[in-house]
Amino acid sequence: MSTVSLSDVEVRVAVDGLPDPKVLLQDVTLSLTEQRIGVIGANGSGKSTLLRLLNGLVAPTGGTVTVNGSDTVRNMRAVRQQVGFVFTDPLSQLVMPTGREDVELSLRRSVRNGPERRRQADAALDRFGLLHLADQSIYELSGGERQLLALAAVLAVEPDVLVLDEPSTLLDLRNRELLRRTLAGLRQQIVMSTHDLELALDMDRVLVVESGRIAYDGGAAAAVAHYRALCANSLEVPRGRNVASSVDPSGEDAR
Amino acid sequence: MKGNGVLLANYVPGTSVIHRMPLWLKFLVVLACGMASFLIVDWRLAAAALALMCTLFLFSGAGPARLFRAVRPLLPVLLAIGLFQWWQLGAPTATRIVLNILLCVVAASLLTATTPLHRLLDGVVSLARPFQRFGADPERFALTIAIMLRSIPFIAGAFEDVRDSARARGLERNPRALVLPVFITTVAYARHTGDALAARGLGEPDD
């Protein structure tokens, strides 16, 4: 199994109009060795930034990220050969007009021979039951077919690690189940962010990201329970503040 | 986005003689049509060349609808060019110019309708290979063309979507409500495409 390591990672970005950079992630030190790792957390908590670090799409402003010993900044090419990335919206990911052409695009760098490239592309499509749609426009495919196609295009080059950024967000129940079964059958190490807590429960290890920090790191059931508690607390605080904190018995504003 | 489903240069699968023709020969036909558009000075000859090219197109089995789709976006421009040339140089010259432009468009469409994009890209890579000695990367050449073919219909689709939403808010006459969102959408699209390519390790300098 691959090892993805993050050491004292911090990501800050400059924001127009703000004097200080905005902190997207901080104090992240992790060693990811399990086969299925989930990342859950609220919108804007830093999940996508964490995932993008693993493929070198985001460079850390502090600390280091390595995949099987390759640094994501200094050995970006080697890292991208090992780490495949699936985006939330497959249409942002699929570059070519048809499925076969898109899978062939993935293979262009590694397979120079045209007929062999086509054979491998067809094999990758066939694996996901998409061969009959190979020549269809990507716009004519359903959301689930597109997501599977994006997955096929990434897996065609046989990466060791598969990173998925909320892959089930745009899918209906049936396609979500299809994706879930497909992921369960993969040999790759999977690191996946999701809002689907049922999907998160399938994982061997789950990280809860909250305000740019890892708020919990552990087994799936405990992590999901922790996340639920965090959400419940964040909903209750304003109500409590209305009743208790905003009006101080002494007559002064509570802070 | 509803408008983005339109693809430029989409391939129509088939087994016709034209489908099976070698790529270099198809390139040569397109080149010849481009040259002919400069050399043909009689509108009747231009009409005959266009008729021949349309016949070849229909013979390929790509169908009249695909042919019309290739020409349709150009019709307003051709009308404007035709009217201007008619006013400046007379009807025969205006007709010849319009027919010659159509000849080039139909020839290019014949190439793209009967050749899968990956084969076109292989052709571009082969054509660009001699420039390698000057530091050019043929694969990046091909990738750039693929991205261009994918992006033009996306931007056209984004414009359609923005126009509809401006209309829904009663802002169809406000140029800022039309241009600015298209610009923002296009920049976002470019960033997403860049991310998608980078994530797949495509188009990197050391590639």
Image: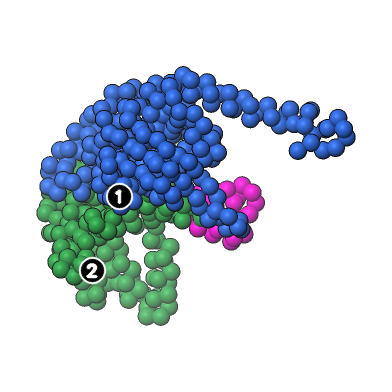
| Chain letter, disc 1 residue | A
How far is disc 1 from disc 2 in space, using C-alphas? Answer: 43 Å
Q: What residue sits right under mark 1 in the picture?
A: A76
Q: Which chain wears green? A: B
The image quadrant of residue A219 is: top left
From the image, state whether disc 1 or disc 2 is nearer to you. 1
* Label 1 residue SS: helix
The vertical placement of A173 against B98, above or below, is: above
Amino acid type indicated by mark 1: Met
Q: Which chain wears blue? A: A
The image quadrant of residue A187 is: top left
* Label 2 residue SS: helix
The local crowd at label 2, few if under 14, some if 14 to 19, many if 20 or more residues have their Cα within 10 Å, is some
Amino acid type indicated by mark 2: Gly
Is residue A241 in view? Answer: yes
Q: Residue furthest right?
A: A251
Is B71 magenta? The answer is: no
Residue at the (29%, 58%) spot, across then down: B144
Q: Nearer the viewer, residue B107 or A185?
A: A185
